[in-house]
Image (cartoon, rainbow, N blue to C red):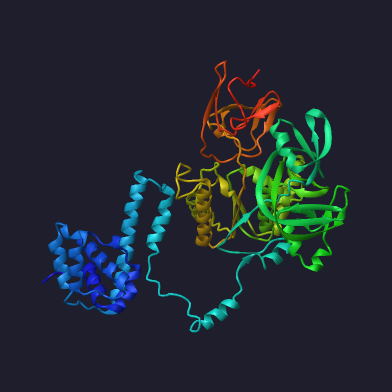
Amino acid sequence: MTDVSIESLILNNLVNSEPYTRKAMPHIKPEYFTGSQRVIYELILDFISKYNKLPNSSVLDIEFQKSNAAVRPDRHEILQAIHDFATPQPAEHDWLVDSTEKWCKDRAVHLAVMEAISIIDGKSADKAEGAIPEILNKALSVTFDTNVGHDYLENADRRFDFYHHVEDKIEFDLDMFNQITNGGVPRKTLNIILAGCVHPDTKIVVRITSLAVEKEIKIGEVKALLENGYTLEVSSPDGWVKISDFIDKGQWDEYSFSCNDKNISCNENHLFQSTLGWMSAKDIFNAQEVTLSKLHFFCDTGRYEPGTVIKTGKKIPIVDIHVEHNNNRYYTNGISSHNTGVGKSLGMCHLAAADLSMGRDVLYITMEMAEERIAERIDANLLDVRIDELKNLSQATFSSKIKNLSDRTKGKIVIKEYPTASAHVGHFRALLHELKLKKKFTPDVIYIDYLNICASSRIKGLSGSVNTYSLIKAIAEELRGLAVEFNVPIWSATQTNRNGYCLDPLTIVETEYGNKRLNEIVVGDCIKSNTGFNEVVTVFPKTKKKAYRITTSSGKTIICSADHKFPVNDIDKSINSGLKIGDSLVTLN
């Protein structure tokens, strides 16, 4: 008597039992079979896919003879198995379905383990070791899902329950944000903070340090001034603050802000300092009438004045500047506005502090700043002390404020630092498991600072076949999956259209504590320049660009991108903007 295996029983019933075939076939993959059985299954699958009917043994015999598999050395074994289909091997339906489901899961896990071994051995061209947990999770999740869709009439009761289900949300500390989001952000979501910005013609008042000149200019003129080597400061509620960067953010929908005789064209995310805190143009536009009556905005007169926002329906160019001050604000056409810094660490630190004050457990993952720098910003939010005044607090005063905070909240914040662009969801998942095991800590909300400088668990890195968009998209998908897996909202931020000027990561720079390679520099380090030692405020992730080696007549060399700028006769030049052989570069001493 011939032994019957689960594989042969599955194949026989795929030909002889339509109810079983309709139930099982959508979940059975060809790779689950091996050898001659895979050939037979692919014949069955091709026929059913084409004709939507079950084949008999005669049909399969003919299809096999026409296929490329007819010359296989095991063709007689395949033909014998096909002929045996003429004799049905019936089995109890539910038992066979359950047994097939278990077999599919076992085969999926086996194949996943083999793929994981291949990745570990370095034989995978496109997957990194961080992809292994996802591969195994996918295999373990194989199931014969009985839900094949929502029947509009039969499932009406379920739909009614859904309409009246109260969704679990994480509330904001700002009433306006709660109104806009209808009560906060849901769990299992990835939420991104984007920075605000204005039209290039928006007026700002700057001071050109080297010329000792103060003048009103269009914000779009900042780019050319910085590129030509001028040091600029902009007027702000905190006095003159240095401009360190100019960012072009492309086309956006126009929101027009009016405050007395002052007008500003901006995008929906641009923030204005109001009597209800920092508010975006979109928030102001959507505000209810009762809220608008309370809204006034801080102006260069030193007073709060009433204002409104309309959406024009037009598309306009949008730019922004980055200022080097903890408050990250400056006057745009006489109105206190927030620069791009609010879109990332400051905004998330405020939200994290608010979550803690409301008794929630928070995990804050940082790859841009040191753990202590993040804690410093959270201290400023929770202890009601300016950042620059924290260092002036006595030990007793600081400890007293921390104790008062501890007494009024049950929440905790854990801050974890990773090197820039080195950590991905695999690391975050391991951290979450470790915190639960060692500290019994399970966060209610997670902040990741920030998306662009995470690594991907699935893509090894930028190369000729992987562009920046694909990499960032993959990271966002992985973070969203993490939010679903751990049933929490995840907050992050993204940096838009900041190209940067690039150097070889092995380039040596001088710091206060000796020479370092560029890839060893972190936020807070002080690097020597022609004006002395200056603090690093941002570290950008590594990207792939075409490299150029520049060699001077004295033998000094530097490797850079075509965008990297060098001062030449009081004008900054890059290879793209005309740097050429014969130009003189400034060197040390």
Residue 264 higher or lower than 244, as above or below: below
Image coordinates of residue 170 in percent, x first then y, are: 63, 63
Question: Is 488 displayed left or right of 142 in the figure?
Answer: right
Closest to the observer, 156 or 229: 229
Query: Quarter of the image containing the C terminus?
Result: top right
Closest to the observer, 75 or 200: 200
Image coordinates of residue 199 in percent, x first then y, are: 73, 49
Q: At 55% across and 44% down in the image, what residue appears?
A: 418
Residue 215 higher or lower than 348, as above or below: above
Query: Quarter of the image containing the N terminus?
Result: bottom left
User: Can residue 528 be seen from the camera position used here?
Assistant: yes
Q: Single out the residue that lies furthest toward the left.
A: 1
Question: Is 170 displayed left or right of 25 in the figure?
Answer: right
Closest to the observer, 516 or 363: 516
Q: At 15% across and 66% down in the image, what residue appears?
A: 79
Question: Is 537 displayed left or right of 299 in the figure?
Answer: left
User: Can residue 344 be seen from the camera position used here?
Assistant: no
Residue 562 higher or lower than 140, as above or below: above
Image coordinates of residue 274 in percent, x first then y, are: 80, 56
Question: Is 253 displayed left or right of 164 in the figure?
Answer: right
Image coordinates of residue 536 in percent, x first then y, are: 65, 35
